[in-house]
Amino acid sequence: MTAAASADAPARGGSALLEVDGLTTVFGAEGELTAVDDISFTVRAGETLGLVGESGSGKSVTALSIMRLVESPGRIAAGTIRLRGRNLRAISEREMREVRGGEIALIFQEPMTALNPVFSVGSQVAEALLVHKRVDRRGVRDAVVELLESVRIPDPGLRYDDYPHQLSGGLRQRVMIAMGLACRPALLIADEPTTALDATLQAQILDLLGDLKERFALSVLLITHDLGVMAETADRVAIMYAGRIVEQGTVRDIFRRPKHPYTRGLLASLPGGTPGARLKAIEGTVPRLGQLPPGCAFAPRCPDRMARCDEAPPAVAPVAPGHDVRCYLHDGEGAG
Amino acid sequence: MPLVEVRSLVKRFVRRHGLFTEPTIVKAVDDVSFTIAEGETFGLVGESGSGKTTTGRCILRLIEPTSGEVRFRGEDVLAYSAAEMRRARRQMQMVFQDPYSSLNPRMRAGDIVEEPLVIHKMGGREQRRDRVAELFQLVGLDPAHLRRYPHEFSGGQRQRIGVARALALNPSLVIADEPVSALDVSIQAQVINLLMDLQERLKLTYLFVAHDLRLVQHICDRVAVMYLGKIVEQAPAAALFNRPQHPYTQALLSAIPVPDPDADRSRIAVDEDRFDRAAPLREVAPGHWAAV
């Protein structure tokens, strides 16, 4: 199941399953819009890495880049993406198709758009199994019912013949997860899997994902803007802002000892504290792609802005083992 | 006298499935009653299908209720003629969820904010122009951007345009239906602060319709929880969040993900066997009502 542990694998967690190094994805005719800018992270066997960011932060483009699903005029301009040591950027499209839905499954926010409305949900899950030759035609119905049962769809035998529109949003998301799990992937990429759902349904899906992760020994790359969801599900967290990972660490590093002014600002802006008190908002707006400042992209909104923040973006620097920050406050040279 | 009084409000929709099947009647709002005091922020929370949005729209008669009473400053809003209702709408305005689809993309921001003044024939051209500039400043927009189109603004700025439009006629009641849920996390707090500032400066009364319980807890004085068309619990915000009485409220509160990796994760499932859907609201503590 796991590849040989890489030499620099840290003590905590399993071996590296997915290693993204220096990934840069650009858009525009001349590649002038950098949606993902030199990001590096690792998803280890059995862990959940949370990728947090606002709209335009590049978190979904990161997911598409890993799957090699970035459409023209977008393209991956630099970096490596290794799955169990194999460079996904170097393999053929045919091999990549085997990886998609095989070793890596992707589930989206809106299950209605990802399911085909004219086929029954059972037949769509069956298709996923047959394409990857997990079972033959005779055994497929039983295998599908078993999968629907594992994602806790009530009466899975009866639901098999239902069409997507006959299911509630929560059940549709379960079907999506069942399709994702059909080929026993090692990595599940979940892009805002519960954002469209109500609170009580979201809680059920999050609990389900937690259980499935244990049962199927999954690693999860969870993409969300919801810090509550992140705190509940992630082992480690990477915070993205304007295409860059500005901070990365364990879930406790991020929530207990946040270092980057953006991370601190996000956590401080959440409602809580004295009812009716003004919230500590981050002033200003997220910069648009193509209008990024030459230095740190957060500098225009940053309460700790210094002269050099506007000159060049800071490099990634560790503040503690496994806790990295991209900020001049923490680059080891002090705030000078 | 409360500013708003809603009594036994009912809204039924007829849902037709096909030619040969009997249409079913959906009770979107099922015997809902509450009052909102002047200057108060009243929260209406619930999940999709709970009837919270329909309730808000029935108060403005954007949807005609099936039966029940809506009183505004003691007057029966549902008995108003069309002309009277138009006049009454100056007093009650709405801020919508989605600042992307609720603004006409072909109109300039200044014209969007001015439109209610034109419709209600308020002031001359000069006066209206001054008023729009004043509204821009009030909501934290730069009056230099009056001639820009909605797409030239960020999501947070667009919601400010929506707020400015709602305030153009000097309303006393603002119904805000999920006003920040479409915005980025770092922008939500800005818009919430704006709404709180405006309430203080303009003595506004808010009906705040939302699903984000943490936000509701922060800004509302009193809260009603809706489930399948009925209010199942209503209380001052602190009491509702600290001592929820109805099993559905308890389940809903336990479902909110807490932004703290060490928080208690135990959840209470929504179990309809645990509660009687027909139970009437009773006062379990002063001002705290629950259908238990």
Image: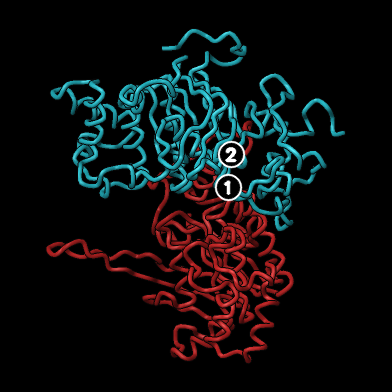
Chain colours: A cyan, B red
Q: Nearer the viewer, residue A263 or B46?
A: A263
**Is B41 situated above or below B253?**
below
What residue sits 48% from the left and 32% below the top? A76
**Is A290 situated above or below B91?**
above
**How far across and down, in percent of the image, does residue B103 sit?**
50, 69
Residue A237 lies in what quarter of the image? top right
Residue identified by numbered label 1 = A289
Q: Is residue A30 visible?
A: yes
**Is A293 situated above or below A314?**
below
**How far across and down, in percent of the image, does residue B139 sit?**
68, 68
User: For residue A243, which numbered disc appears in the image?
Assistant: 2
Secondary structure at numbered mark 1: loop
Residue neighbourhood size for the residue with mark 1, other residues' Cα within 10 Å, grouped as few (<14), some (14–19), many (≥20): some
Which amino acid is tagged 2? Gly
Q: Residue furthest front?
A: A30
Residue B195 lies in what quarter of the image? bottom right
What residue sits 69% from the left and 68% below the top? B142
**How far across and down, in percent of the image, does residue A33 sit?**
55, 43
Question: Marks 2 and 1: which is nearer the front?
Answer: 1
Tell me which label, 2 or 1, sits earlier in the chain. 2
Q: Are marks 2 and 1 in contact (CB under 8 Å)?
A: yes
Which amino acid is tagged 1? Leu
Answer left or right for A148 relative to B188. left
**How far across and down, in percent of the image, does residue A278 sit?**
73, 56
Q: Residue furthest right?
A: A336
Answer left or right for A104 relative to B88. left
